[in-house]
Image (cartoon, rainbow, N blue to C red):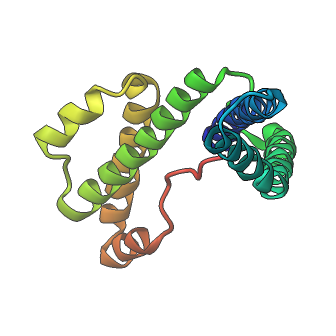
Amino acid sequence: MYGQLIDIQGKLRHAESQLLRREAKIAEAEEILAQDDIPKSVRLGALADKIEQEADIPTWDMNLKGAQQELADIKAIMAELKPQCKFADLDILRQSEAIQQEEWLLELQGRAENFMLSSGSIPADHLQTMRCHPEFKERLVPFITNMATQISIASEKGPQEMCALLGEVSNVPLLK
């Protein structure tokens, strides 16, 4: 939504520039037409320029109103969604980083769970990637430890319990 907001705001700024350029071209054409001693070809060219500029006004005005409405809609949606945003208190750049960090954490938790359930361990290259996560010690290690404990308990109870653990819904929490 934020990207769309920036895009529409930029387009509206360009529209302001287009409006000024159109007004300047019309004013220039009118200045030429106000002169008495100009050749007919220059007069006709100025008249054509003025008509050309004025012909686009209804379409341009409609497009401008549409863009303004789109901007208002985007702002309304963003305001409605903000209370539900997990990182709403952060500025947009830090918010994006926090979201990416959380997504990465959840991806790594899912990988850890799959590796441990399928092969009993996490391959070294994936473990190295996990260690790069800023919350490795605080969130990934406890997750991996918990997963190892669950696997150990299930394997002690027998194949049925292990199959039940494999069939359970992932322990990875959903994004909020």
Vertical comparison of 30 with 53: above or below: above
Residue at 27% x, 27% y: name it.
Answer: 131
Picture quadrant where residue 105 is located: top left
- Front-lying residue, 41 or 90: 41
In the image, is 167 to the left or to the right of 57? Answer: left
Q: Can I make out residue 40 in this image?
A: yes
Vertical comparison of 154 with 71: above or below: below
What is the quadrant of the N terminus in the image? top right
- Front-lying residue, 19 or 127: 19
Vertical comparison of 116 with 79: above or below: below
Q: Position of residue 114 (x, y in %)?
A: 30, 59
Q: Position of residue 76 (x, y in %)?
A: 87, 45
- Front-lying residue, 101 or 157: 101
In the image, is 40 to the left or to the right of 167? Answer: right
Residue at 76% x, 44% y: name it.
Answer: 50
Picture quadrant where residue 5 is located: top right
Q: Position of residue 15 (x, y in %)?
A: 72, 37
Residue at 79% x, 34% y: name it.
Answer: 33
